[in-house]
Amino acid sequence: MATLRQLEYLVTIVDEGSFTRAAECLHITQPGLSHQFQALERELGGPLLERLPRGVRLTPAGRAMIPHARAALADAERATSAARRATGVTDGELHLATLYSISFGVLPSALGIWRGEHPGVRVRLFEHRRTDDLIAAMTAGQADIALGPPPTGWEGPTRYIGTEEFLVVTHSGDPAAASEHAPRIRLTDLADREWVHFTPDSGLADILDQACATAGFRPRIAVRTEQAPAAANYAAAGLGPTLVPANTIPPHFGGILLRPDPPVSRPLTAYTRTSPDPIATAFMETLAEQVLLTPPHVHNRLRQAARPA
């Protein structure tokens, strides 16, 4: 049976791209590394790597094994960390996986509070573009906790955190901002516009497309970007309306904020593969109790816009 040390050798060789660099990283001799790796290949009955003149290449057997090797190493690291926490050790790492838009909008305040309460626990953050990518990474053992939309078919513990509100953003001279319904806007009223959209590999693209489809049209595209803050800035500059999470809007933002009618939202959950340890549980408590999914400055902007002139 392969040992954790041998799995570490495999992962390091693949990540470093050569036996020489892997040996340096692992602080062992290259002959020693080669000997141990050959023992692993004999144990498994075939080669895991193809030795090339400049580097290495995974064989089919190696490609089948590498995700499991990474997951096993991640599990071992978390097991050690959990044991230390259970004995009262307050340092270590919390591994957290999420989406880019959530990382920008939700996590800064949550991590700020968390850092103040647990200064000895480091946080390692893994960011993903789409929910499917986040679920796959969590399934493979990448993190202690995932923060994202409810994972379909997830069998591990899941905790509801709250619901993100999405807002239409446009420029200050947009006639839509002066309508009698402001600060609300029907997406059908924007069907003839060109939109600030998101790159196809961004999960925000799916949300915008679905909201427009529900309103009965397919958005025409003025420009695409990957990040919600950039989309909001492009919309404020007059390139077209966009749809972003309210928590990605900074204070003193120069554009116009409108609530779509009907509302567009995204539920958020924190989920784990197995029962969360005390530190992971405490972090989920911080998320559930402290995070404001629509910031006060956004609430104030929308409330002021709703007042009669």
Image (cartoon, rainbow, N blue to C red):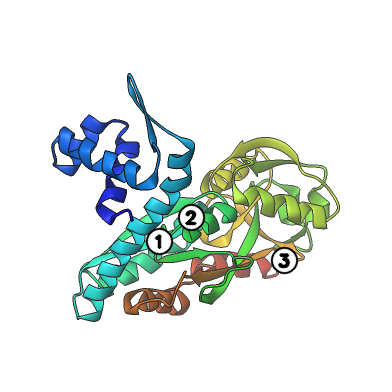
C-alpha gap between disc 1 and disc 2: 8 Å
Q: Quadrant of residue 304?
A: bottom right
The kind of residue tagged 3 is Pro
Could you tell which of marks 1 and 2 lies nearer the N-terminus?
A: 2
Label 3: element kind:
loop
Could you tell which of marks 3 and 1 lies nearer the N-terminus?
A: 1
The kind of residue tagged 1 is Ala
| Res. 143 mark | 1
Q: Nearer the viewer, residue 211 or 57?
A: 57
Establish if 184 lies above or below 232.
Answer: below
Q: Where does the image place residue 124, in percent across and percent down from the top left?
A: 33, 57
| Res. 263 mark | 3
Q: Where does the image place residue 187, in percent across and percent down from the top left?
A: 78, 55
| Category of crowding for the residue at label 1, using alpha-carbon neighbours closer than 10 angstroms: few (below 14), some (14–19), many (at least 20) | many
The residue tagged 2 is 137
Q: Nearer the viewer, residue 212 or 151?
A: 151
Q: Where does the image place residue 107, in percent across and percent down from the top left?
A: 42, 62
